[in-house]
């Protein structure tokens, strides 16, 4: 832990006024393609400016200018701020928190969506609950056309505070995006902001930090959607193996937040979890004939753990790879043979 600096602190984070209840902060960077649908999903639930702040915070986009889109789609209801220079994802999240004025902050990525009832349901739960530090909901996975691809697993079948949530979130990152999480603004003031040294895992470390200090509420109804597309930053990071490397560092940094009597076991299980995550990535990369990516993922996975369980899992990865090689070789050979015998 000594090798890592503490999380960034907010120099000035004034206490929020009684209203608005919500600050919906929408960070964006080269995502104008999806931003209009994101804004529409929020505006469809807009209770008015007295109860909800809505602002797009652009991280100095280079491939598009979301300002005109925000002015057109927002109809004057949505504020817009452009960073003077690129900050990076975590620092832009922190800027969103600093610019927020509501009691509860919702960082909604500009390619994700809120589904009907998100704000009403969570406000009905959180209003008057001074003990809860954060809340999140079950979510759907959708494609670029918003066709549902799947849903997240249940954390619980009923709504409520998750007992010992640190034991779950400390071992596995089950919250795929900040878009499904709302955080009391004062919690950010108490615990600090998103770490800039974890580009791929700053949100996971934040959820672990919050769970170590505050009760976390869960809503099992699907109230948000995470959009999968090829331009996600996570796709580029995975090609370099940086996703797994950052999450491994997240486990190292977060160990001090784990309950002392379970910290060793939680760290071990978290590292095994990351190894299997990397192996899944490797199999997917191999299926796309991205051999360099596949072996980077395997390498990073083995840096997380070499337990007996992990090594058994690795054997399965290489069996899958071998089957892929054989299938590809057979297909190429068959194609060559067919072309050869079809000649006059």
Image (tube, rainbow, N blue to C red):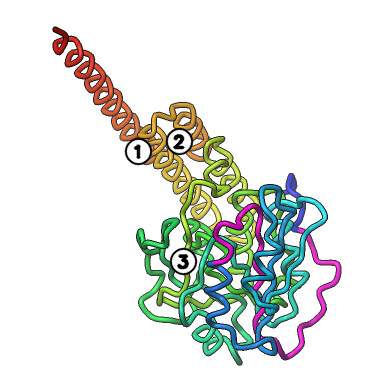
Q: Which mark is residue 306?
A: 2
Quadrant in which the C terminus is drawn: top left
Q: Nearer the viewer's eye, disc 1 or disc 2?
A: 1
Query: Alpha carbon of mark 1 to alpha carbon of mark 3: how far?
Result: 31 Å
Residue 313 numbered mark, or none: 1
In contact (CB < 8 Å): disc 2 and disc 3: no
- The magenta-colored residue range is 8-36
Q: Residue at x 66, y 77 (%)?
A: 75
Q: Dot 1, crowdedness within 10 Å: few (<14), some or many (≥20)?
A: some
For mark 3, give the secondary structure.
Answer: strand
Identify the residue at the far front of this view: 344
Position of residue 87 relative to residue 192, above or below, is: above
User: Of the numbered discs in the image, which one, if any, rests on residue 225?
Assistant: 3
Query: Which of the numbered marks, if any, corresponds to residue 325?
Result: none
Q: Position of residue 22 (x, y in %)?
A: 65, 81
Q: Earlier in the sequence, mark 1 or mark 3?
A: 3
Which residue lies at the image location 45% right of the left edge and 56% below the top edge? 144
- Give the residue displayed 81% in from the left and 74% down from the top: 13
Please check the rendered image and state whether residue 213 is part of the magenta-colored stretch, yes or no.
no
């Amino acid at each position: 832990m000594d090798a890592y600096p503490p999380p960034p602190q907010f120099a000035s984070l004034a206490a929020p006024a009684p209203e608005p209840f919500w600050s919906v902060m929408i960070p964006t960077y080269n995502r104008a393609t999806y931003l209009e649908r994101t804004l529409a999903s929020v505006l469809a639930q807009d209770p008015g400016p007295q109860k909800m702040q809505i602002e797009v915070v652009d991280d100095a986009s280079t491939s598009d200018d979301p300002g005109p889109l925000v002015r057109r789609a927002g109809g004057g209801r949505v504020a817009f701020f452009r960073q003077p220079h690129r900050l990076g994802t975590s620092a832009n999240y922190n800027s969103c928190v600093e610019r927020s004025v509501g009691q509860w902050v919702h960082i909604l990525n500009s390619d994700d969506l809120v589904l009907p009832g998100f704000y009403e349901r969570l406000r009905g739960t959180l209003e008057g609950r001074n003990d809860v530090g954060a809340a999140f909901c079950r979510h759907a996975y959708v494609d670029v056309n918003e066709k549902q691809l799947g849903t997240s697993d249940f954390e619980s079948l009923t709504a409520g505070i998750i007992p010992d949530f640190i034991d779950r979130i400390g071992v596995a990152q089950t919250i795929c995006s900040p878009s499904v999480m709302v955080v009391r603004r004062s919690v950010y003031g108490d615990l600090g902001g998103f770490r800039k040294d974890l580009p791929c895992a700053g949100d996971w470390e934040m959820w672990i930090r919050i769970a170590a200090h505050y009760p976390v509420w869960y809503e099992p109804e699907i109230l948000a959607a995470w959009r999968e597309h090829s331009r996600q930053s996570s796709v580029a990071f995975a090609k370099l193996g940086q996703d797994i490397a950052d999450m491994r560092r997240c486990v190292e940094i977060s160990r001090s937040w784990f309950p002392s009597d379970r910290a060793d076991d939680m760290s071990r299980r978290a590292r095994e979890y990351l190894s299997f995550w990397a192996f899944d990535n490797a199999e997917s990369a191999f299926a796309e004939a991205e051999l360099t990516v596949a072996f980077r993922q395997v390498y990073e996975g083995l840096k997380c753990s070499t337990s007996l369980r992990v090594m058994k899992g690795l054997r399965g990865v290489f069996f899958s790879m071998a089957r892929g090689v054989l299938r590809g070789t057979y297909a190429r050979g068959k194609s060559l043979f067919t072309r050869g015998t079809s000649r006059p």
